[in-house]
Amino acid sequence: MTASVKKVVLAYSGGLDTSAIVPWLKENYDCEVVAFVADVGQGEDELEGVEAKAIASGASSCHIVDLKEQFAQEVIYPTLKTGALYESQYLLGTALARPIIAAAQVAVARQVGADALAHGCTGKGNDQVRFESAFAALAPDLTVIAPWREWSMRSRPDLLAYLAERNIPCAASATKIYSRDANLWHISTEGGELEDPWNEPSAQVWTWTVAPEQAPEQPEYLQLSFTAGSLTAINEQPIAAVAAIERLNKIAGAHGIGRLDMVENRLVGMKSRGCYETPAGTVLYAALQGLESLALDRTTQDYRIRLGNEFAQLMYDGRWFTPLKDVMLAAAEQIAKPLTGDVVVKLYKGTVSVTQKRSPNSLYSNAFATFDEDTVYNQKHAEGFIRLYSLASRIRCLHQTAAAEAADKEQP
């Protein structure tokens, strides 16, 4: 602890870690602590009483900033257009929220005249990189404090004892099993039995989705309407981004859709296991893929797939505030321009499938694809195409044959 700070803005959640960080900062840095709470759709239960908790912990004030609309419009929908899936599975629920939270934290720091920023990320996780990379891009002049990399406390009992010694109230207990992170897009669960990949997740792991085998016996169909890759209506009723995601989370979650049990490669070099629930994201991803199959030509669709893989890596690694992000999102926006139309999805027992799709920009033509007689496609034309398409293979074989014949002639 070499930095000298007077006022620090702490990314505060009201949980055990940040409740302990407030008094620890005051004691070890002799500074004023301003709590910052980002409302990214984690739910009213998570936000209830959070300001009072922050003040009781020793914060001088608490700023609660509603970021849900900005999160949906500026991060979730643009990222969805890239088709990003980390390691071909993860819809990046935690990673997506970090840039918007970090930017708002910096804004609060500027507003209150703080000279430092603090977070409760551990030294083993990805989030420390995501937050601090954002701070470096937006406020390199501010000191960054990461208590988990400085203090001697290493466990929940340590933190609880620290708070008890100071008579600071905290609802957490030493028996808490899981670590969870929720926002508008998803909820993640780590810890408990999940630390052994041989253990199947228990029923207590899942909070947003029912078990697929307990989902309704009858499927549910939804018509989703898109304009340039952004959802605009559900069942022909216009709907805004936040409301759409919240509604789809409830509907799809009731059908057991959106569960992922994954062992992933963290940015810091270790593997970790997490269970993710992303009902709305799973449905929207499937629906957009359905529209892509109609409206994108082969080479553009192939590039979008590669773009999605690269953007997933960029997001996971915390590189949102970079020129490369701007370039990649601009490409995704251009690719998504023809993605206007309607998609009907079938929700049933943990699965989502596209059953109908249509678009004014569809490249599919029944006149060309039909097996019946047509006047627009002369099948004889395929012969010339195939000869040109396979020309390199033909020339290679001719060379190999000529070389073999020449070698035979040289044999005594």
Image: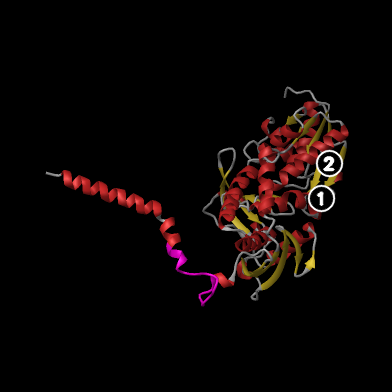
Measured from the top left, where is residue 35 in percent x and y? Answer: 82, 39
> Is the image coloured rainbow, by chain, by secondary structure, or in one colour?
secondary structure
The residue most toward the bottom is 372
- Residue nearer the viewer, 75 or 264: 75
Measured from the top left, where is residue 20 in percent x and y? Answer: 76, 38
Q: Secondary structure at mark 1?
A: helix
Residue segment shown in magenta: 369-383
Q: Can you say whether 112 is above or below 327 in the image?
A: above
**Three-letter code, disc 1:** Leu
Q: Is residue 366 left or right of residue 173?
A: left
Compare marks 2 and 1 and give the one earlier in the sequence: 1
Q: Is residue 55 left or right of residue 280?
A: right
Q: Is residue 254 magenta?
A: no
Q: Can you say whether 257 is above or below 183 in the image?
A: below
Q: Can you say whether 229 is above or below 380 in the image?
A: above
- Residue nearer the viewer, 359 or 317: 359
Measured from the top left, where is residue 44 in percent x and y? Answer: 81, 54
Q: Nearer the viewer, mark 2 or mark 1?
A: 1
Asked whether the viewer can see residue 175, the reply is: no
Calculate the distance from the C-alpha at mark 2 to the C-alpha at mark 1. Answer: 11 Å
Residue drawn where x is 61% and y is 64% of the image: 363
Residue drawn where x is 32% and y is 52% of the image: 397
Query: Which residue matches tag 2?
Result: 54
Residue drawn where x is 76% and y is 36% of the image: 21
Q: Which numbered disc covers residue 47?
A: 1
Question: Residue 269 occupies which quadrant of the picture?
Answer: top right
- Residue nearer the viewer, 301 or 220: 301
Determine crowd level at label 1: few under 14, some 14-19, many 20+ residues with C-alpha closer than 10 A: some
Asked whether the viewer can see residue 78, the reply is: yes
- Residue nearer the viewer, 42 or 21: 42
**Three-letter code, disc 2:** Ala
Determine crowd level at label 2: few under 14, some 14-19, many 20+ residues with C-alpha closer than 10 A: many
